[in-house]
Amino acid sequence: MKEINIKPRAETIIFLGPPGSGKDTQAEFLVEKLGFQLISSGKLIRLRAEHDDELHDILKKGDLVPNNIIDDEIISIFALLPDEQPVILDGYPRTLEQAKKLDLILSENNRKLDKVIYINVPDKDLINRIKKRRVCSSCQKFTMDKFEACPYCGGKLTQRNDDTPETLKNRLKVFHQNTKPVIEYFKERRVLLEVDGSPSIDRVKESIRRLF
């Protein structure tokens, strides 16, 4: 009887959390240590917004990007990924409709959802973080305003257009209205793993590391 070789299925996980919760930083750790491919819906949309004034205005206000736009971006990325590539989704899905759409996207790409890591941080802590957060114009990594230049590559530090207290309040409102149902959806499916995102970056990193 001919032996059938079955390839191990690549792991697919989601990072969920409110704006400023540290999803990008923690996801980058898994990229470096475990070889995951990071798919950041925020970065994809911000790149697209550079050539789309209407989308740029949506981001500046902190409103939710229409489902069809972000779904198309995610579908295109998955179509290009090798079957054996483990993936982290950061910032998607953000609505219940997107969560159900993701099930279909993964199925069409011979994947299934393995884990959803929810980084939970109180709103008041997030507002303080955002006021101090800066992003490098070269490597796009986040840091704090105590640095004069990027500590990773020496690039120029700037504040993102949507990292203002006014925009953050609206983004948090959108998060609570639209993403909390997504959290409950994944909790019911028993794939949700909650992590306290309030401690230091290293302590949160250790909590996430233990999940693998």
Image (tube, grey):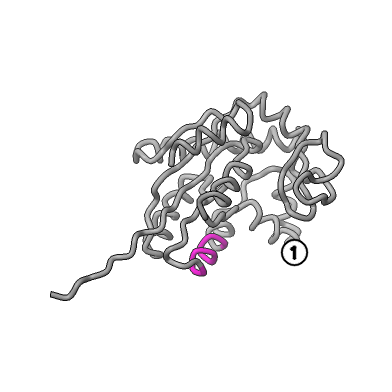
Q: Magenta-highlighted stretch: main secondary structure?
A: helix
- Using residue 71 as the reference point, say whether residue 62 is left or right of it: right
Q: Is residue 77 magenta?
A: yes
Which residue is labeled 1 in the image? 51
The residue at 53%/45% (across/down) is 94
Q: How many marks?
A: 1
The residue at 38%/41% (across/down) is 191
SS at badge 1: loop
Q: Position of residue 67 (x, y in %)?
A: 55, 54
The residue at 60%/26% (across/down) is 198
Q: Position of residue 46 (x, y in %)?
A: 70, 55
Q: Quadrant of residue 142?
A: top right
What is the three-letter code of the residue carrying label 1? Answer: His
Camera-nearest residue between 57 and 125: 125
User: In the image, which residues are magenta?
Assistant: 73-80
Q: Quadrant of residue 149?
A: top right
- Using residue 30 as the reference point, say whether residue 132 is left or right of it: right
Camera-nearest residue between 29 and 102: 29
- The residue most toward the left is 1
The residue at 64%/58% (across/down) is 44
Camera-nearest residue between 106 and 56: 106
Q: Position of residue 60 (x, y in %)?
A: 75, 46
Q: Quadrant of the C terminus?
A: top left
- The residue most toward the bottom is 2
Mark 1 surroundings within 10 Å by alpha-carbon count, few (fewer than 14), some (14 through 19), many (20 or more): few
Q: Quadrant of the N terminus?
A: bottom left
Q: Position of residue 89 (x, y in %)?
A: 52, 51
73 to 23, vertically: above or below: below
113 to 83, vertically: above or below: above
- Using residue 115 as the reference point, say whether residue 49 is left or right of it: right
Q: Is residue 158 magenta?
A: no
121 to 103, vertically: above or below: above
